C-alpha cells in the first residue's frame, strides 16, 4: 500500500516527507544498533521504492559509517536525532521509525539479530507500565 508520511528530528531543524510503501520493518537487536539507538534495539523501515523529499534541514544531516562495516547512521547535527538515509548506492531508503510524525499502518516484521539482544530485555513483560512520567 502506498502511503505518505512525514517526519522530523527532535529539534525540528530536519523535516521530511516520504511517499511510497515500506517493504519491511525490522527491530534490530545487534550491539551496533543498540549503541547507536541508546536502547534495546533500533526500529527501521526499509523501502526500495519510496522517495524522500527533504522539506527543511538537509544541511543539518550528517552520516556516520562505522569503519570496515556496512553499519551507517544519519542524524541531525543540531540535536543528534536519527533521520532517514539512502544506502546501497541510493537504492534503499532506511527510515528510523521513531523519526516519523505520522501514524504508521504497519507493524514490525521481525526482531532481527535477536541472539545478540541485551539480556535485560528478556523479562520485560512483568515490568509495570506508566502512561506518563513516574511520580
Image: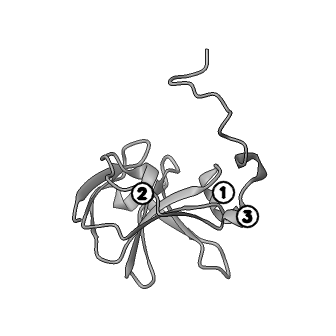
- Verify CB contact (< 8 Å) between mark 1 and mark 2: no
| Image coords of residue 36 (percent x, y) | 62, 58
When the figure is inspected, residue 5 is found, relative to residue 86, above or below; the finding is above
| Image coords of residue 129 (percent x, y) | 58, 28
Q: How many marks?
A: 3
The residues bearing labels 3 and 2 have C-alpha atoms spaced at a distance of: 32 Å
Q: Nearer the viewer, residue 94 or 103?
A: 103
Judged from the image, the secondary structure of the residue bearing numbered disc 1 is: helix
Reading the chain from its start, which is encountered first: label 3 or label 1? 1
Judged from the image, the secondary structure of the residue bearing numbered disc 2 is: helix
Q: Going 34% across and 77% down the picture, which residue do you hit?
A: 48
Q: Going 61% across and 20% down the picture, which residue do you hit?
A: 134
Residue wearing tag 2: 60
Reading the chain from its start, which is encountered first: label 1 or label 2? 1
| Image coords of residue 86 (percent x, y) | 41, 74
Residue neighbourhood size for the residue with mark 3, other residues' Cα within 10 Å, grouped as few (<14), some (14–19), many (≥20): few
Q: Quadrant of residue 50?
A: bottom left
Residue neighbourhood size for the residue with mark 1, other residues' Cα within 10 Å, grouped as few (<14), some (14–19), many (≥20): some
Residue wearing tag 1: 34
When the figure is inspected, residue 134 is found, relative to residue 92, above or below; the finding is above
Residue neighbourhood size for the residue with mark 2, other residues' Cα within 10 Å, grouped as few (<14), some (14–19), many (≥20): some
Which residue lies most toward the right here? 119
Q: Nearer the viewer, residue 4 or 130?
A: 130
Reading the chain from its start, which is encountered first: label 3 or label 2? 2
The C terminus lies in which quarter of the figure?
top right
Residue wearing tag 3: 116
When the figure is inspected, residue 123 is found, relative to residue 129, above or below; the finding is below
Which residue lies most toward the bottom here? 89
The residues bearing labels 1 and 2 have C-alpha atoms spaced at a distance of: 23 Å
Amino acid at each position: 500500500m502506498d502511503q505518505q508520511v512525514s517526519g522530523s528530528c527532535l529539534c525540528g531543524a530536519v523535516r521530511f516527507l516520504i511517499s511510497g510503501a515500506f517493504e519491511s520493518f525490522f527491530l534490530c537487536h545487534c550491539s551496533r544498533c543498540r549503541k547507536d539507538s541508546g536502547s534495546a534495539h533500533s526500529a527501521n523501515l526499509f523501502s526500495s521504492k519510496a522517495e524522500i523529499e527533504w522539506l527543511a534541514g538537509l544541511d543539518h544531516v550528517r552520516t556516520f559509517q562505522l569503519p570496515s562495516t556496512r553499519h551507517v547512521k544519519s542524524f541531525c547535527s543540531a540535536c543528534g536525532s536519527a533521520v532517514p538515509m539512502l544506502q546501497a548506492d541510493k537504492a534503499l531508503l532506511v527510515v528510523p521509525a521513531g523519526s516519523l510524525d505520522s501514524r504508521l499502518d504497519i507493524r514490525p516484521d521481525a526482531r532481527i539479530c535477536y541472539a545478540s539482544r541485551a539480556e535485560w530485555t528478556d523479562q520485560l513483560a512483568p515490568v509495570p507500565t506508566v502512561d506518563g512520567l513516574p511520580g
